[in-house]
Amino acid sequence: KELNYAVRGFPVGFTAPPNYTGLKEDEYYLYNHLRFTITYREQADEFEGVRITGFDVHPVSIQHDLVDSNADLSRSSIASCGSDSIVRNDPESYLPLRTGPTGEPLTILYSYSVEWQESHVPWSDRWDVYLMGNPDDDVHVLSIINAIMIVLFLTGSTATIMVRTLRNDIALYNELDDLEDSQEETGWKLVHGDVFRPPSTSPLLLSVAVGTGAQIGTSVSITLIFAILKIVNPMNKGAMLSAIIFLYVLSGSVGGFVSARLYKVCDATEWKYNAVATAVALPAFLTGMFIILNIFLGIAGAATSVSIFTIIGVFLLWTCVSVPLVFVGSYFGFRAGKLEVSTKTNQIARFIPEKNFARRSIATLALSGIVPYVNMIVEFAVIMNAIWLNHFYYTMGFLFVSILCVTISCIAINIVTCYVQLCGEDHRWWWKSFLNGASAGFFIFLHSIWFLSHRLQLVGMLPVVVYMTYMSMISLCFALYCGSLSFISCFWFTRKIYGALKVD
């Protein structure tokens, strides 16, 4: 069965095992002929001339027969490459990589042939061959099924354990409150007077990070939906990147609304300052990184360097469009009522006891980050091949399902770590919940370093700097999305469990 699908490049040869050749060792053969098949379409009633609709390259291994070894090499002097015959792979004429018995050099004749074939493929469908599935897609499908099963198991087991545990805890705490001589409070109920205490370390930065992560998640989700509906062509990488940036700017109202609502929970009133920081923080940081990278490119004289005025112009255009939308979202966010909580905050913060290993920051960071990363490791590897190895990536449906699995697993694992932290009488969950989710971006960055050392063959320092700069941007955006998701889910979780308690 013949399969026609697109791959990057072609092999230089192949190996035949001993059971095929009858020799004691493997035999090596070389592809020394390339057969180009160019397809075209003529349709006089639709367009003038001829349109190229595709081409195939078939490598062939063949021992050429020379009519006259002393004559100049031309098509007429090569009997095995005549104009009336098509060069094909034939086991009887494979070119083995062997030298003579006394070590004579091996002379190899390289050749090519071109065949034109009329095709009925419309001009609009000429890219379909690149969208055809190849044998490696089976691994891709199995990885998605594996991720879905992991998410279902993780979510089901987490939900079952948490519901049963919380139901028993809440029933026990409420029963003790009804008794006159109640025992001393234990567990997560002890911190009910401090659990909603605003973070002492930069609540503005936390609200901006959460709002920016929500904005990134909204823009990427809408872009994937557009790609699935074929509104955006996934084969055009530039169009996909432009769509993400454009939708990120248009999603500024979402980021402003989420950031303002959180900033108001922290008893802050400077909503204009919060709106400006939400609109400018990430674009300014990414622009600064790109300017530094562009300086290196300019010093090296690279053709990919751009003018500093172009960078500043794009930044101002981005900011001037995004800031008004963020202000609109912040305005409605601050006008909305403050998110009510069921417990009052004590004037003096409660002492936090010493934590065991399971409740330490390094353990929760590793667990919360590695679970979402494992759920999308195969998909991320395919995306890395598409970005840096010029592979084709078109399975937007798989990517959407993969991100959905990452979202669900991130919510589940961070709710568990938040519950474990509260059971340890540690009420400082605000920043920890965000950082636990954001640690997934750190694992993405580690994967990019492994990809650089094992898959890429970059020569010189400048390509490495370019690669690490762009992967740092991608890791940062992924960390902001997961951190925002983690914080919002933990905030919802704490409101739910403490809202079910009877607290004086």
Image (cartoon, rainbow, N blue to C red):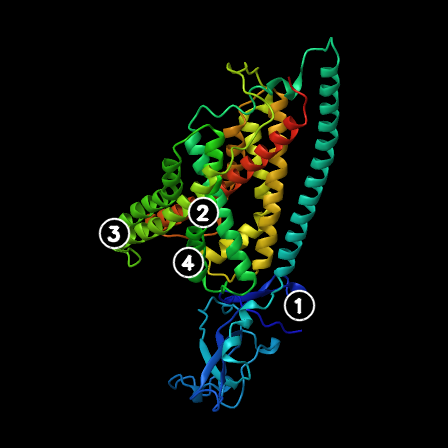
Q: Give me the residue at 74% from left, 9% from top.
A: 180
Instruction: Using residue 313 as the reference point, say whether residue 171 is left or right of it.
Output: right
Q: Are marks 1 and 4 in contact (CB under 8 Å)?
A: no
What secondary structure is found at the residue carrying circle 4? helix
Foreground residue among 423 and 43: 423
Closer mark to the observer between disc 1 and disc 4: 4
Q: Amino acid at mark 1?
A: Tyr
Give the Cα distance between marks 3 and 4. 20 Å
In the displayed structure, 397 sits above or below 358; it is below
What secondary structure is found at the residue carrying circle 1? helix
Q: Amino acid at mark 3?
A: Ile
Q: Give me the residue at 51% from left, 47% from top.
A: 217
In the displayed structure, 280 sits above or below 102; it is above
The answer to whether residue 380 shows anywhere in this view is: yes
Mark nearer the N terminus (4 vs 2):
4
Q: Which residue is mark 2?
A: 253
Give the Cα distance between marks 1 and 4. 52 Å
In the displayed structure, 341 sits above or below 254; it is above
Foreground residue among 445 and 233: 233
The answer to whether residue 367 shows anywhere in this view is: no
